[in-house]
Amino acid sequence: MSLITKSKWGNSQLTTHNSLLFLIILITALAAGPGCRNGYQSGLFELDFAAKQVIKLTHDDFDNLNAVWSPDGQKIAFVSDRSGNWDIWIMKADGTDLKPLTHQTSEDRFPAWSPDGKRIVFASNRSGNWDIWVMNPDGADLKQMTTHRRDDLVPAWSRDGQKIAFVSYRDLEYSIYIMNTDGLNQRKLTTGGNGDWGPSFSADGSQIAFVSTRTGNGDIWVIDTEGQGPYLQYTRDPRRDTMPVWSPDGSKIAFLSERGGTLDIWVMEWDGSHQIPLTHRVSGKWQTRFNLNSELYQAMGYFTLSWSPDEEKIAFTAVGKQGKGDIAILFLSPH
């Protein structure tokens, strides 16, 4: 049974926690080379605050991004440049036993686990442009899923393991596409947005949440997986909202919002109601390293959220006190 309740989300100790640093990691565009981005580095770490609500996982100066929980909660896949290039790595959920899964001179990013934990889908430019690939959790049995000459990025697996959603620029606009897990039946799901990003399947697989600038601002939208239903706009704040991710039981959607002046973690009900912050700004401002109107989607790849399977934690990327980016684990109940 899920431990997430309305009283927990509204708990004043959590939402007013004054030690959490969550500043935006604005690095360089996806096409940039490996290493430090615009003078900022990110690190997968645990912030050990008095309330024990955020912990760190690693203690290094490398860029570490896009942490995603394995379905059994025992491992975390992430992206790191610790080998000199952007590769997919894996570690235990306590931050130990780090191992590389890819070893390419190209870039590998945006890992996502299959629901049974037997495969990891990701995006890579090893073929000359960005395509969707899949591999075993040990890096073996690598297969290319898309071969279009335009970029395909940010894959997401449906909870039943039958579909993969991804972002593509193949029609000269960033749109959400969907395909079978063998790469067949690729079809366009969203149209008219020219800026749709970050797909996340609902628990029953009937809907996909995503971020879009189709109204001129970054907001959270939802559409059915057949692409037949209406586009449902879940957020309308003048500040940007981005990177939604459905909770494993489908009752909540976590997302990032700039509403407080810096990028914080928010949560809402499955239908878009009861939007509340889980973190609050404590220092710093939105640090612009991109033109977020024209380069939003190159930046947003760094700002993914991942629920733990037990729904008690959220992994996220932040910037620490020294201006170094980090991935932290936010506990949703007293820890």
Image (cartoon, rainbow, N blue to C red):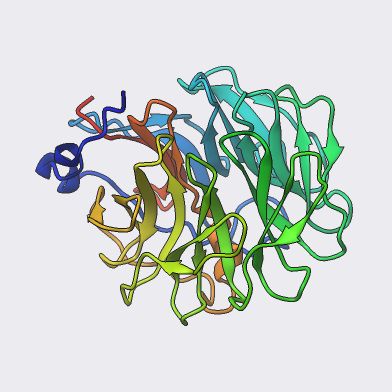
User: In this rendering, would 116 be left or right of 243?
Assistant: right
In the current view of this chain or complex, which residue is farthest to the front? Answer: 228
Answer whether residue 317 is visible to the viewer in this image: no
Q: Residue at x 48, y 22 (%)?
A: 73
Q: Residue at x 63, y 73 (%)?
A: 191
Tell me where residue 79 sits by quadrant.
top right
Q: State the image coordinates of residue 71 (x, y, percent, origin top left).
A: 53, 25
Figure check: 254 above or below 329: below
User: In this rendering, would 190 be left or right of 68?
Assistant: right
Q: State the image coordinates of residue 27 (x, y, percent, origin top left).
A: 56, 60
Which of the image's four quarters has the N terminus? top left
Q: State the image coordinates of residue 97 (x, y, percent, origin top left).
A: 58, 17
- Closer to the camera in the image, 27 or 219: 219
Answer whether residue 130 is visible to the viewer in this image: yes
Which of the image's four quarters has the C terminus? top left
Q: State the image coordinates of residue 59 (x, y, percent, origin top left).
A: 47, 30
Q: Residue at x 49, y 69 (%)?
A: 231
Figure check: 254 above or below 263: above
User: In this rendering, would 77 be left or right of 217?
Assistant: right
- Closer to the camera in the image, 232 or 239: 232
